Image (cartoon, rainbow, N blue to C red):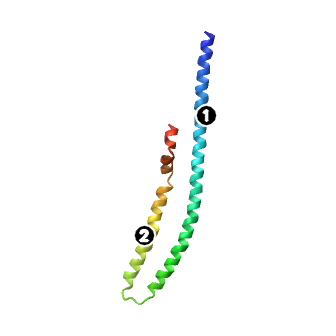
């Protein structure tokens, strides 16, 4: 009888220890995913800064084109606005989707580990 009770206690304690280790490993995994995500954000911010410099150069070229004699100024303004708004919005939407935490949890399959 004592052996049976000790067997059940050992089994329960092993299950408890396994669940505790599983929780700790999931927490460590989530911290690693978060650190990778943050380092990737910093790398892409550097890349975006360089792209802003390129866009500034493009803006200077377009401004130079703007100085050319064309009759309708409102049309030129709308063309320039739509061009630069598109240059801003497309990468912005991609970055918002790429860096959402929900997307990262789905890609890394961390939601399956948390169940």
The residue sitting at 48% across, 58% down in the picture is: 96
Quadrant location of the N terminus in the rendered image? top right
Q: Residues within 10 Å of mark 2 (few under 14, many from 20)?
A: few
Q: Is residue 89 above or below residue 60?
A: above
What's the distance in space between the residues labelled 2 and 1, CA to CA? 49 Å
Q: Is residue 9 above or below residue 43?
A: above
The residue sitting at 43% across, 71% down in the picture is: 85
Mark nearer the N terminus (2 vs 1): 1
The extreme top residue here reads: 1
How many numbered badges does the structure rendering display?
Answer: 2
Q: Is residue 88 left or right of residue 15?
A: left
Q: Is residue 59 above or below residue 25?
A: below
> Which residue is the site of mark 1?
21
Q: Is residue 96 above or below residue 84?
A: above
Contact flag, marks 2 and 1 (Cβ < 8 Å):
no
Give percent across and percent down for residue 36: 58, 52
Based on the displayed image, in which of its 4 quarters is residue 49 positioned? bottom right
Give percent across and percent down for residue 75: 37, 81
> Which residue is the site of mark 2?
86
The residue sitting at 40% across, 73% down in the picture is: 82
The residue sitting at 63% across, 16% down in the picture is: 6
Q: Residues within 10 Å of mark 1 (few under 14, many from 20)?
A: few
Q: Secondary structure at mark 1?
A: helix
Give percent across and percent down for residue 107: 49, 48
């Amino acid at each position: 009888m004592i052996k049976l009770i000790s067997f059940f206690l050992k089994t329960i304690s092993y299950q408890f220890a396994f669940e505790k280790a599983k929780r700790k490993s999931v927490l460590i995994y989530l911290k690693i995913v978060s650190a990778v995500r943050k380092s990737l954000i910093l790398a892409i911010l550097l890349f975006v800064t360089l792209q802003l410099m390129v866009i500034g150069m493009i803006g200077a070229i377009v401004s130079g084109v703007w100085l050319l004699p064309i009759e309708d100024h409102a049309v030129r303004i709308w063309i320039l606005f739509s061009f630069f708004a598109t240059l801003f919005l497309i990468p912005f939407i991609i970055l918002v989707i790429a860096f959402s935490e929900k997307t990262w949890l789905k890609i890394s399959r961390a939601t399956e580990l948390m169940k």
